[in-house]
Amino acid sequence: MRLFFWATLIILVLVRIFLTKPTYPEGKRVRVRGVVREEPIKYDYQQKINLLGLKVFLPKFPEISYGDSLIVEGRVKEGKLEEARLVRLERSLGLLVKVREKIIGFYKKSLPEPHASLVAGITLGAKGEIPPLFWKDLTQTGLAHVVVASGSNVSLVGGFLLGVFTLFFARGTVIPLILTAIWLYAALAGLEAPIIRAAVMGSIAFGAQAAGKLASAWRALILAALVMLIIKPEWLGDLGFILSFVATACLILFQGRIEKFFKKVPDILRQGLASSLAAQIGVTPILFVTFGQFNLLSPVANALVLWTVPLIMAISGMAGLLGLIFPGLGRLVLYLAYPLTGWFILINTLFSK
């Protein structure tokens, strides 16, 4: 029965990949319509979006946001839409998108840069607002992955809510509440590959817990990959998708062993160092082949800042929700994260030299 289940999923993935893969005539002008499912990356004079498997560069204005519906026209060349022209823009009317925009706006009004964009990136994956020079430093130090919402964010949300909900609700009620909250957060943070991967794996883990069964990390990871490729086959060539699964596989394989090796390192640094080194084992070759660069001190920089991420996320998440109703109170709470973001920025500056 298990063999039939896995074989069916694999066959569905193959069918989806070969039958639904969009084909664009190379060198021809095409018109593409789709919804922006990833946070656009903004540069000084332009912005980059991924739309139905194509990389599209548009002028900086009008600004495109997550959830917007677009019609763009341009010439196809090697997976890019060159000479792209925005034909039509329909702003998203989704409630979660509006809430996301208001929270990000609250961060930008309350904190100076790059503190505001750092908080927005860690909490909601809003990498589109990160200043270009700060983003360049983050990529050089190997800390860019921290400033975009990732699987660890979903784990933090699930773990935090598990502790809170068990104080007020019965076990049978807690799991559905957590699953609902995880997917609400995934939608709020942007439905990018790492977020969805973590949400699927988290759903499997909590669902298995509710059924009284232990969920294998490997089975959950493979099932998440197959389910995601059935839903969106173009993720097979997405770098974020590949890096997310490779990093997670390396964490499963190596993190425990590396933590034992560094058992004399203080606890506050050991987990960050171990997780960073474990992930880098698989991620580094891919990044080097793709971008041709790697910072040897990246694991050290990660170890020095990763302990701040859960605290920044908890404080800024609470502050963001409060800021929607009581801006003054939310701002006071948000200021508690300022020393933590200051430390993060200091480490990023030192290791980018």
Image (cartoon, helix red, strand yellow):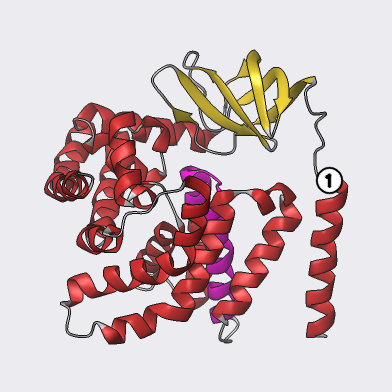
Quarter of the picture holding the N terminus: bottom right
Q: Is residue 190 magenta?
A: yes
Q: Residues within 10 Å of mark 1 (few under 14, many from 20)?
A: few
Amino acid beneath label 1: Thr
- Residue 72 place in picture, x, y as percent: 68, 19
Is 321 left, or right, of 233 in this rendering?
A: left
Residue 121 rendering spot, x and y as whole percentages: 36, 42
Give the overall secondary structure of the magenta segment.
helix
Q: Give the range drawn in magenta.
A: 183-209
In the rendered image, residue 2, in percent from the top left (x then y), is placed at 78, 84
Q: Nearer the viewer, residue 333 or 118?
A: 118
Residue 131 appears in the picture as rendered = no
Q: Is residue 270 above or below residue 52?
A: below
Residue that numbered label 1 is attached to:
20
Work out whether residue 97 or residue 291 is closer to the camera in this orientation and state it: 291
Quadrant for the C terminus, please.
top left
Vertical placement of 186 versus 135: above or below? below
In terms of depth relative to the viewer, which is nearer, 303 or 204? 303
Please provide percent x and percent y for residue 313. Answer: 30, 52
314 and 43: which is toward the camera: 43
